[in-house]
């Protein structure tokens, strides 16, 4: 598809869960009511009604100031600082006779300090302005009439414009997907800049617009979209499209958000729905706030204390001055005759001593202003600017892969980096690279793969012995010489399987079925280089890519997918040569977090119907047939070993189907898939649940998600600095513990508190499906675990003494409210 040809794939046959019909009931009934009043005239941005509605343009500004607001807003920011305001007052007073010095000496330092800070603010905001200009001047193809598309700057987009976004480009606005390079109008979207997720999201256009696959198709295209008003919710979208007297419901599946990126799809066509500050990503952002760091706030408190000392000195001095001045003239006698109190100004007049005392107080305040360090603010501003420069030029914070250095958008909060006390982090894609490598597998109860993982090295280190030169038959020096694997996603080393040697294994037929399942059970799309013939893959997740690459390297090359078939180059164990085999693709039961498994139903060239399934061990072992558990014990042991080594595992199994069974399933499956009820997914789950039973075990896969470069050292330094680190992961408990040690999150001598909810009672409740009861029981068990651990290890007196900040609120059937405050 790299040459721009339209992909002839009907992938709605593949994606049964993500792609489906939407009901006009429910939220769609609100269209036209308050909050759902937006009307978009597709391909008619100049429609008179669109002009009346006066939608926002697509220009986006993230700067803190404008040319008109810079001076007043910046001055306001400067005089928010108490010291600056104080010197402004004293500067004004310096123009009166109260000042013991000239006005210039008071005003000039203040002007210099404020000017320097304002210049710094202006430079930083100018840099933001330059970034805005770069974004707003990006180009996108826009329909200009007669089926012609021209490049146009993002800032010139209008609501209703038809745009064509090409592969690896960002979406310039919130766009309704109309069609794509695939016949079924699906596309892959990367939302990493929105939610940090690296896995690709699948989007699909309406069937009514999926045929708009050429530029010329838009010459006479007209449609009206009625949808929700601009809002900040990234995961909802409600609307309808009126197209040729059809009313088609819209949902988030058709919405492409600004700043997300088109991936693995040659191009898409879309209609602009929300522009500029109406887009969901901008709605979620806030105007550049006036941030003040803790150090600055602390400094203000110190300034307040110095004010107190200053006013106290001036107040005491003025009282003494007032009393003394009053005594200068008593009964016509002058105490301090040399001051001539009988002929003086108001500042020293004994007859108006209280007024003289007040004026003396003001003079003293002006005189003692040197106690307030106005230059301290300048010094701190200079330090912040220098810190920002050092951050921007720090070679250790430069990412070579993306060619991006660190960039401090503002210097106001530099010192906050040194005051972080807690870090909350995800594991995948944050601590790890989210780049999977196929490294080990278990087939027919035999473990294959001689690679050594980072976690295994950490485990050896914990045991107090250095990692041996040769571990599991793999020489570490050879591994070091090879470095990164030559094939991305594949780091498998085992002479028993590679280079076609698996045909000599005792269970070669099982290995053949295992590798064939890897090559068939997925949703990846192949791309064949017409010059070299090399096959690469576009997949939703790195796991899937690693599996099809491993199958290719081990003799089962997936090279072609059509609407109804998958083609492989298989290694024939009899002839030892590659043969072409075509499998009819009948159904794909998609993987999701609830099912924890994925299946495909295919028909081979001999006419056999096969259900191929891969999934988590927690749901797969219980689905095995009593005659399909031959290798279960060994496979379980291997999966546990792989989990201990920090690897991600999946169980592979299959079953043969008879024609009548499949026909009945397919009928019910299509009925559930075509349902427009709210229970659509539940109906699909119910149908697939009955089919994915009585499986025959083949084996298990193990892929490694390597740690990011320097993660252990980074976490170790953060821990030494006293920073508390929390990491969220969906791994098994043993895997999580070992990865924790590998990345230095856990260390020797650290106390471990393990709370496990994998109990028979919980599993029984989960099967019943009463979520309210399950939640209460889990809270109760967590409470019991925490309480027993504290009682056993610390004692009841220690529990009472461990009063700190965290609260646990438990409301169970046995308790009205139990509140414990624990450390």
Image: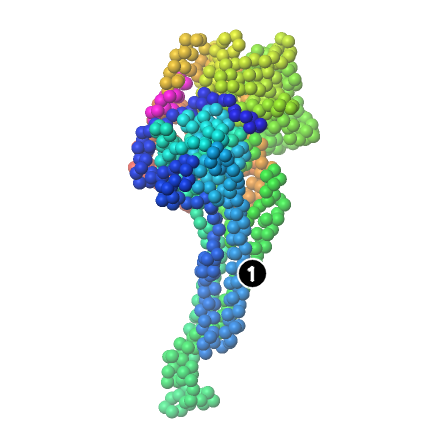
Classify the position of the N terminus by image quarter.
Answer: top right
Question: Residue 520 at x, y = what percent?
Answer: 53, 18
Mark 1 residue element: helix
Residue 476 % position (x, y): 67, 28
Where is 536 relative to 336, above or below? above
Seen from this angle, which residue lies furthest front? Answer: 146
Per the image, is 509 magenta?
no
- The vertical placement of 465 against 578, above or below, is below
Q: State the extent of the magenta-drawn residues as a range.
A: 673-690
- Determine the residue positioned at 44% across, 26% down: 210
Q: Is residue 157 above or below residue 530?
A: below
Observer able to see residue 618: no
> Label 1 neighbourhood size at 10 Å, few (<14), some (14-19), many (20+)?
few
Which residue position holds label 1?
379
Q: Quadrant of residue 594?
A: top left
Dominant secondary structure of the magenta stretch? helix
């Amino acid at each position: 598809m790299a040459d721009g040809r339209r992909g002839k794939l009907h992938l709605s046959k593949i994606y049964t869960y993500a792609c489906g019909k939407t009901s006009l009931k429910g939220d769609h009934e609100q269209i036209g009511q308050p909050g759902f009043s937006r009307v978009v005239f597709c391909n008619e941005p100049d429609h008179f009604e669109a002009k009346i509605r006066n939608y926002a343009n697509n220009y986006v500004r993230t700067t803190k100031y404008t040319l008109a607001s810079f001076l007043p807003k910046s001055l306001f920011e400067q005089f928010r600082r108490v010291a600056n305001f104080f010197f402004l007052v004293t500067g004004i007073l310096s123009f009166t006779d109260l000042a013991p010095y000239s006005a210039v000496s008071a005003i000039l330092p203040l002007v210099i300090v404020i000017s320097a800070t304002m210049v710094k603010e202006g430079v930083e905001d100018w840099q933001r302005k330059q970034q805005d200009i770069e974004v707003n001047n990006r180009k996108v193809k826009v329909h200009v009439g007669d089926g012609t598309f021209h490049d146009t700057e993002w800032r010139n987009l209008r609501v209703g414009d038809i745009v064509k976004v090409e592969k690896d480009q960002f979406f310039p606005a919130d766009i309704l997907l109309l069609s794509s390079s695939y016949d079924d109008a699906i596309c892959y979207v990367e939302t990493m800049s929105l939610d940090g997720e690296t896995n690709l999201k699948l989007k699909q256009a309406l069937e009514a617009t999926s045929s708009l696959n050429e530029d010329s198709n838009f010459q006479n295209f007209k449609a009206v979209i009625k949808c929700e008003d601009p809002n900040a919710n990234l995961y909802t979208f409600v609307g309808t499209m009126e197209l040729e007297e059809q009313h088609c419901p819209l949902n988030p599946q058709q919405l492409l958000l600004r700043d997300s990126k088109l991936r693995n799809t040659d191009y898409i066509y879309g209609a602009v729905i929300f522009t500029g500050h109406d887009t969901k990503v901008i709605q979620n952002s806030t105007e550049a706030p006036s941030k003040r760091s803790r150090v600055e706030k602390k400094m203000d408190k110190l300034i307040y204390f110095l004010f107190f000392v200053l006013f106290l000195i001036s107040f005491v001095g003025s009282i003494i001055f007032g009393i003394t001045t009053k005594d200068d003239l008593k009964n016509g006698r002058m105490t301090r005759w040399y001051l001539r109190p009988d002929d003086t100004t108001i500042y020293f007049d004994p007859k108006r001593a209280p007024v003289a005392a007040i004026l003396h107080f003001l003079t003293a305040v002006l005189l003692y202003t040197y106690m307030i360090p106005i230059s301290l603010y300048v010094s701190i501003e200079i330090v912040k600017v220098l810190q920002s420069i050092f951050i921007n030029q720090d070679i250790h914070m430069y990412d070579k892969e993306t060619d991006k250095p660190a960039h401090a958008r503002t210097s106001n909060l530099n010192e906050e980096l040194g005051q972080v006390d807690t870090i909350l982090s995800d594991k995948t894609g944050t601590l790890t690279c989210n780049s999977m490598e196929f490294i080990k597998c278990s087939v027919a109860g035999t473990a294959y793969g001689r690679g050594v993982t980072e976690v295994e090295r950490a485990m050896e280190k914990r045991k107090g012995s250095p990692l041996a030169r040769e571990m599991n038959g793999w020489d570490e020096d050879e591994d070091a010489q090879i470095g990164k694997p030559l094939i991305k996603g594949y780091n498998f080393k085992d002479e028993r399987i590679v280079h076609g040697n698996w045909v000599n294994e005792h269970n070669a037929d099982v290995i053949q079925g295992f590798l064939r399942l890897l090559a068939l059970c997925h949703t990846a799309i192949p791309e064949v280089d017409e010059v070299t013939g090399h096959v690469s893959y576009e997949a939703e997740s790195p796991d899937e890519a690693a599996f099809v690459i491993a199958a290719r390297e081990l003799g089962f090359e997936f090279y072609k997918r059509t609407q109804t078939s998958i083609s492989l180059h298989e290694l024939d164990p009899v002839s030892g040569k590659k043969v072409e085999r075509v499998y009819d693709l009948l159904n794909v039961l998609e993987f999701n977090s609830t099912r924890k498994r994925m299946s495909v139903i295919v028909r081979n060239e001999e006419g056999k119907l096969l259900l191929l399934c891969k999934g988590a061990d927690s749901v797969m072992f219980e689905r095995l047939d009593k005659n399909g558990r031959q290798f279960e014990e060994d496979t379980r042991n291997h999966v546990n070993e792989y989990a201990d080594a920090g690897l991600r595992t999946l169980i592979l199994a299959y079953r043969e189907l008879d024609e009548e069974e499949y026909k009945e399933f397919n009928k019910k499956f299509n009925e559930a898939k075509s349902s427009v009820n709210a229970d659509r997914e539940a109906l699909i789950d119910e149908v697939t649940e009955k089919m994915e039973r009585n499986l025959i075990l083949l084996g298990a896969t193990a892929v490694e998600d390597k740690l990011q470069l320097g993660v252990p050292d980074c976490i170790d330094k953060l821990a030494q600095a006293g920073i508390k680190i929390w990491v969220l992961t969906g791994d098994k408990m043993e895997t999580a513990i070992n990865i924790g040690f590998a990345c230095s999150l856990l260390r020797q001598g650290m106390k471990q508190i393990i709370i496990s909810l994998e109990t028979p009672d919980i599993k029984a409740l989960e099967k019943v499906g009463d979520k309210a009861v399950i939640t209460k029981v889990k809270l109760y068990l967590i409470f019991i675990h925490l309480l027993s651990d504290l009682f056993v290890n610390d004692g009841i007196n220690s529990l009472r003494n461990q009063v700190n900040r965290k609260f646990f609120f438990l409301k169970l059937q046995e308790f009205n409210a139990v509140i414990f405050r624990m450390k």
